[in-house]
Image (tube, rainbow, N blue to C red):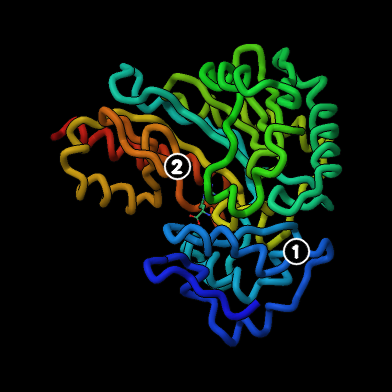
Amino acid sequence: MAFPKFHSSSCALIKKYLTPGLYEQLAFLKTGTGFTLEAAIQSGLKNPDSHIGIYAGDAHTYSLFSAILDPIIHAYHSVEETFTHRPDIDQTNLSPLDPDKRFILSSRVRVARNLKEISFPCHITSQDRIQVEHLVSKAVQDMPGEGHYLPFTGLSPSRMQDLLCRKQTFPMGDRFQDAAGINRDFPDSRGIFSSLDKKFMIWVNEEDHLRVISMESSCDISRVFNRLCLGLDHLNTRLEFAFDKKYGFLTSCPTNIGTAMRAGVHIRLKKLEKNPSLLKHLVNQYHLQIRGTGGEKTSVEKGVFDISNKQRLGVSATQIIENLHAGITAILTAEKKL
Ligand code: ARG
């Protein structure tokens, strides 16, 4: 392939850092499972509004293509060149953020995990995808919380749609994931484990092999996080995850490496909505990010923002929860003052 031509409007980090010299050095390399730079950047090429524009096809991608991935990782996670993953994940005991329930609608914490030695979703074979589902559904059989695993294989589109409305499935990935190859064979070998109370879930074979999620309609971020920690303790004794001392947990998207954790709240901010510069200032100060009401790349409806941590690497999971708590406290103070 000739030096890739990114769209003139693209501001993706891959476009910024991929020089012809670097390209020449990397273009003919293949990971142990055969993943290439050309495959890694397809989504960035097809989607000019990509923010980073590159995916990893397996764990080896991170070391083999470090010359291009490291600068992107530094830029996205705002870490020094000497960055390293911070592994501590201790339960927290922070006070609920909004006990009168005036602003916070729900709290959610998720981590991404991929199984060791198996290609990541953009490069996985259908055989390996079946194997991932088999291993995960076996590992959750004795999970506390009386949960059950719902496989999507064989569900009709109308049944999928019905379950989607009731939030019991996840949809096919967006155009970014599609161009990366993540949606191949959807919904085969995908599924969700959920606890009886629906506060703990595991998505199987979505953007990563596992997305482990704890959520509830409350402002008690500590309780939500601690539930996630317990679920991870169970999984850690049954599954082996793709992990690197420096990069932490290895994920499809380099924005998720490190703790692979996103912790956030859905919060109604009627006043700050009309004062976007102040909200932006507070969000940046606490290393948070804003997403729309419906999640990534959606718009904010009726003043409901999804606010979560931006950094996942170089900070520990526990620190992420503490930063989020401090940031949301500051945002609530500002909202009440206005
Ligand atoms: N590839 C997309 C981009 O570069 C995804 C960014 C992060 N989101 C995600 N779901 N991994 O903008």
Q: Amino acid at mark 2?
A: Glu
Residue in the picture at 59% in, 48% down: 178
At which x and y percent is residue 87? 65, 50
At which x and y percent is residue 175? 52, 47
Q: Amino acid at mark 1?
A: Phe
Is 300 on the left-hand or right-hand side of 309? left
Residue 131 or residue 306, whichever sits in front: 131
Q: Determine whether the beta carbon of the residue marked 1 sits less than 8 angstroms from the nearest atom of ligand 1.
A: no
Mark earlier in primary sequence (2, 1): 1
At which x and y percent is residue 233? 74, 33
- Under circle 1, the secondary element is loop
Residue in the picture at 75% in, 75% down: 29
Is 284 on the left-hand or right-hand side of 68? left
Is 125 on the left-hand or right-hand side of 256? right
Label 1 belongs to which residue? 35
From this viewpoint, which residue is outermost toward the bottom? 21
Q: CA distance from mark 2 to mark 1?
A: 27 Å
Residue in the picture at 17% in, 33% down: 271
Q: Please determine whether, in this image, residue 57 is positioned above or below residue 106.
A: below
Q: Determine whether the beta carbon of the residue marked 2 sits less than 8 angstroms from the nearest atom of ligand 1.
A: yes
At which x and y percent is residue 258? 61, 54
Residue 234 or residue 67, whichever sits in front: 67
